[in-house]
Image: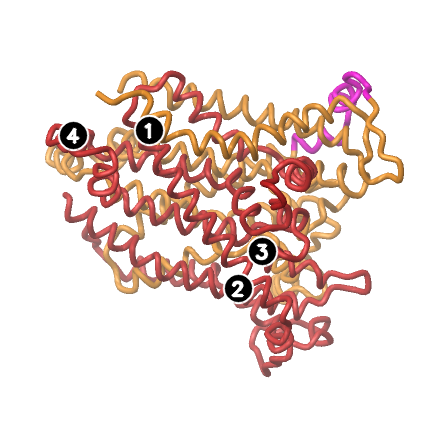
């Protein structure tokens, strides 16, 4: 019923802008990834070195370790955010006193810049000046030291991420849940369906597109987290919280290893795309075909 | 929805709010303390307020300029990406375009890029390639508005698509039968129905742009420098000035808070609309 031309016209500004600020820089990064290059040196020559950078990536212990802890970080943070976000979105749809105020309060972490979140959590958790180690020590006799305990640093970064991003999940699920038509739910209740049946057979399939989009956004943002973790732990202690974003940042900036940093980025971007594409094909595409 | 005991929810939300607000409260606590006091034993209750950090920030014309830049860049970016995202989502949901699912997926890959390594190519493109006559996009507000599209536009498209697809096709098809043009359909039918989704997208993209740090820190020099970038100027070799940093942070929160509360009313309007529809 519509002309294809009009459709492309509506899409074209998006394609042009993303091409200029997405594809172009990407092509450049791929090109650099085949070179040895320190752009900050006095004599910044770009030396073509075949796939040397990629060979290094595959055998880089630090990169592989970083990949592992990033996977753990993303898994724990994103799973908690989705479950918690869904529960809170459902709670905010009910009627209770002060609902509007609570909803506003709940969305507040979202408006904070990652760099600020990192700073505040650092000030709250640094031993001897931070309020959290102080309280844990005086109430429970527990010594929290994110500067020395790898596990403590990991847990604190996960909690910080949950604190910061659960509201995003809540917001987008509220928007999805209110747009649902009430008829199927009423019908199910009349038919005597239980709460969990309604959740699995009606709510979940109906909010699936919004839910998957939310999971995607959280997944890819968690995978490229830099500012927050860099500010909070600097990737330490040791390399306990040296997540991929931090790892690349460290390779590029203090070490000025630009060619190698580019190669890691290409690999990381490739892995992210593959993971998301597999999720997309298995979760969204079958439904799109049916519909 | 009816709840059996609403007060249980209230208690739960008070507990959650406490956990949510504490880091923000702590930011405020740090901002009203002289530096020396930061290194003594922490106390939960504030005993005195020390406002010098705030007056230092307000009396600093450079930081005031950064705030204006932040406001213009994030507002410009949010409006641009929401508008373009809206048009793109309409095209994706109503037109039978070849390879549109691949295009949809491609847009999001732009948000997956690890930011650190893309700083340099963007810097080179802005300083050396993207020029119109003598106007360079480097260190300009419009340049930053466009750069931020790389991560915000995919977000807008991905959050808006379910909203636009959720609007029954029969509504606009009926309008076309009555002879309406695409623009009329977009502005009179799709836009009002998509309002809750558009509002959520608008605030979130605004907030992402307002809070962006890494790109702004690298790609701007003075003309388009933003408030979050101003923060890093207080991390010096002689030590971090946490008090001033906290005060600037509080300032970055205020406009975000205002925008959030204002637009949230529209979300609520959208929510009521959703309820009326059923």
Span colored in magenta: A48-68
B61 to B277, vertically: above or below = below
**Residue at 25%, 37% in the rendered image:** B183
The residue that label 1 is drawn on is B91
Q: CA distance from mark 1 to mark 3?
A: 37 Å
Marks 4 & 2 on one chain: yes
The tag earlier along the polypeptide, 4 or 1, is 1
Q: CA distance from mark 4 to mark 3?
A: 49 Å
Q: Nearer the viewer, mark 2 or mark 1?
A: 1
Q: Could you say which chain is coloured orange in the image?
A: A
Q: Chain of mark 3?
A: A
- Please state the horizontal and vertical placement of residue B260, each as a whole percent of the image: 40, 58
Q: Is residue A141 visible?
A: no
Query: Please, what secondary structure does the residue beneath circle 4 have?
Result: helix
User: Farthest residue in the bottom direction?
Assistant: B48
The tag earlier along the polypeptide, 4 or 2, is 2
The residue that label 2 is drawn on is B24
Look at the image and say whether residue A87 sits in the magenta stretch.
no
User: Farthest residue in the right direction?
Assistant: A42
Marks 4 & 3 on one chain: no
Q: Relative to B72, is A148 on the left or the right? A: right
Would you say the residues marked 1 and 3 are in contact, meaning their CB atoms lie under 8 Å apart?
A: no
**Residue at 18%, 32% in the rendered image:** B172
Q: Relative to B11, is B277 on the left or the right? A: left
Query: Please, what secondary structure does the residue beneath circle 3 have?
Result: helix
Q: Check residue A117 in the rendering and tell me which mark sits there, or answer none.
A: 3
Q: Check residue B167 in the rendering and tell me which mark sits there, or answer none.
A: none
Q: Could you say which chain is coloured red in the image?
A: B
């Amino acid at each position: 019923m519509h002309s294809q031309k009009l459709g492309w016209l509506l899409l074209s500004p998006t394609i042009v802008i993303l091409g200029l600020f997405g594809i172009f820089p990407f092509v450049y990064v791929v090109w650099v990834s085949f070179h040895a290059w320190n752009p900050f040196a006095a004599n910044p020559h770009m030396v073509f070195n075949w796939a040397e950078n990629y060979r290094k990536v595959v055998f880089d212990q630090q990169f592989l370790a970083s990949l592992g802890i990033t996977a753990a970080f993303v898994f724990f943070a994103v799973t908690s955010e989705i479950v918690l976000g869904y529960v809170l979105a459902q709670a905010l749809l009910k009627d209770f006193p002060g609902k509007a105020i609570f909803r506003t309060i709940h969305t507040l972490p979202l408006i904070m810049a990652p760099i600020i979140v990192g700073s505040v959590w650092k000030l709250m958790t640094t031993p001897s000046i931070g309020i959290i180690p102080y309280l844990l020590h005086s109430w429970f006799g527990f010594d929290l030291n994110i500067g020395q305990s790898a596990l403590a640093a990991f847990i604190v970064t996960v909690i910080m991420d949950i604190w910061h991003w659960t509201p995003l999940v809540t917001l987008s699920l509220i928007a999805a849940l209110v747009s649902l038509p009430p008829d199927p739910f009423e019908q199910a209740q009349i038919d005597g369906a239980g709460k969990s049946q309604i959740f699995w057979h009606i709510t979940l399939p109906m909010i699936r597109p919004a839910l998957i989009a939310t999971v995607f956004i959280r997944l890819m943002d968690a995978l490229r987290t830099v500012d927050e973790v860099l500010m909070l732990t600097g990737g330490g202690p040791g390399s306990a919280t040296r997540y991929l974003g931090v790892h690349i940042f460290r390779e590029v900036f203090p070490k000025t290893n630009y060619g190698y940093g580019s190669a890691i980025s290409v690999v990381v971007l490739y892995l992210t795309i593959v993971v998301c594409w597999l999720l997309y094909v298995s979760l969204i595409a079958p439904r799109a075909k049916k519909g | 929805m009816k709840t059996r005991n609403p007060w249980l929810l209230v208690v739960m939300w008070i507990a959650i709010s406490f956990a949510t607000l504490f880091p923000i409260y702590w930011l405020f606590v740090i901002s009203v303390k002289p530096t020396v006091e930061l290194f003594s034993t922490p106390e939960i209750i504030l005993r005195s307020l020390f406002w010098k950090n705030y007056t230092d920030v307000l009396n600093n014309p450079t930081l005031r300029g950064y705030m204006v830049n932040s406001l213009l860049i994030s507002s410009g970016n949010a409006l641009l990406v929401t508008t373009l995202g809206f048009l793109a989502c309409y095209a994706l949901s109503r037109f039978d375009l070849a390879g549109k699912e691949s295009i949809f997926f491609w847009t999001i890959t732009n948000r997956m890029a690890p930011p650190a390594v893309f700083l340099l190519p963007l810097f080179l493109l802005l300083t050396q390639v993207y020029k119109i006559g003598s106007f360079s996009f480097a260190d300009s507000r419009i340049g930053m508005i466009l750069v931020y599209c790389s991560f915000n536009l995919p977000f807008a498209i991905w959050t808006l698509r379910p909203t636009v697809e959720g609007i029954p096709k029969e509504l606009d098809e009926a309008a076309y039968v009555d002879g309406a043009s695409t623009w009329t359909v977009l502005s009179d039918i799709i836009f009002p129905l998509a309002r809750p989704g558009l509002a959520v997208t608008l605030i979130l993209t605004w907030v992402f742009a307002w809070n962006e740090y890494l790109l702004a820190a690298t790609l701007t020099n003075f003309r388009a420098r933003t408030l979050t970038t101003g923060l890093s100027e207080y991390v010096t070799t002689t030590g971090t000035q946490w008090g001033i940093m906290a005060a600037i942070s509080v300032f970055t929160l205020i406009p975000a808070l205002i925008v959030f509360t204002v637009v949230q009313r529209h979300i609520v309007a959208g929510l009521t609309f959703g309820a009326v529809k059923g």
